[in-house]
Amino acid sequence: MAFDSKGTLNKVMLIGRLGQDPELKYTPTGVAVVQLSIATNTSYRDQDGKNIEQTEWHRVVVWRKAAEMISQYAKKGSSVYVEGRLGTRSWDDKDGNKRYMTEVTANQIQFVGGRSDTGGSPTPPSTPQPPEPDFQEPSADEADDLPF
């Protein structure tokens, strides 16, 4: 397992079902992005022997080609495996109150199984790959040095 230079690790792994159909959007610079709500369940018996099921909802952000792939093939109820990092962002609401949101930024997402129980689409021909790192076009001086 890889740690950063300070010996820390920020890694999240989830297997769950989509709570709604993915909606593909693009940033002003044309980068594809999808926000997903993924449900995970935990079951246990309480002290009276009653079976309890608890659902947790996770907000996941998927970028670039993986976002396009997931939006094309996934539907509400699709089962997915997500691997990424946890992050928190903040903003001021219309009343000036500071708001926070914690979400997973996916660096890998794969479909689990075939069709979902809720009529989702079939597994895609290949699983989505992790998003590509940000790409910056070379400057004019750098472009002159390229071999093609």
Image (tube, rainbow, N blue to C red):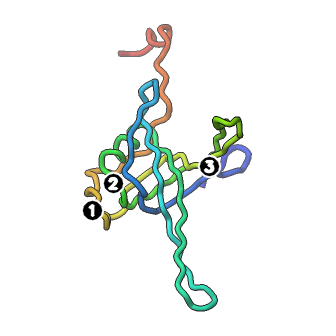
What is the crowding at mark 1: few (fewer than 14 residues within 10 Å), some, or many (at least 20)?
few
Q: Foreground: 138 or 76?
A: 76
The residue at the point 38 percent across, 40 percent down is: 24
| Label placed on residue 119 | 1
| Label placed on residue 102 | 3
N-terminal-most mark, 3 or 1: 3
Q: Where is residue 139 in the image (x, y as percent from the top left)?
A: 50, 12
Tell which residue pokes out farthest to the bottom in this image.
Answer: 48
The residue at the point 50 percent across, 31 percent down is: 134
Task: Kindly check if marks 2 and 1 are in contact, taking CB atoms under 8 A apart as contact.
Answer: yes
N-terminal-most mark, 2 or 1: 2
Among the 4 quarters of the image, the one containing residue 50: bottom right
Q: Where is residue 129 in the image (x, y as percent from the top left)?
A: 40, 46
Q: Position of residue 36 (x, y in %)?
A: 46, 50
Q: Which amino acid does label 3 sit on?
A: Thr
Q: What residue type is labelled 1?
A: Gly
C-alpha gap between disc 2 and disc 1: 8 Å
Q: Foreground: 36 or 106?
A: 36
Q: Name the residue under label 2.
A: 75
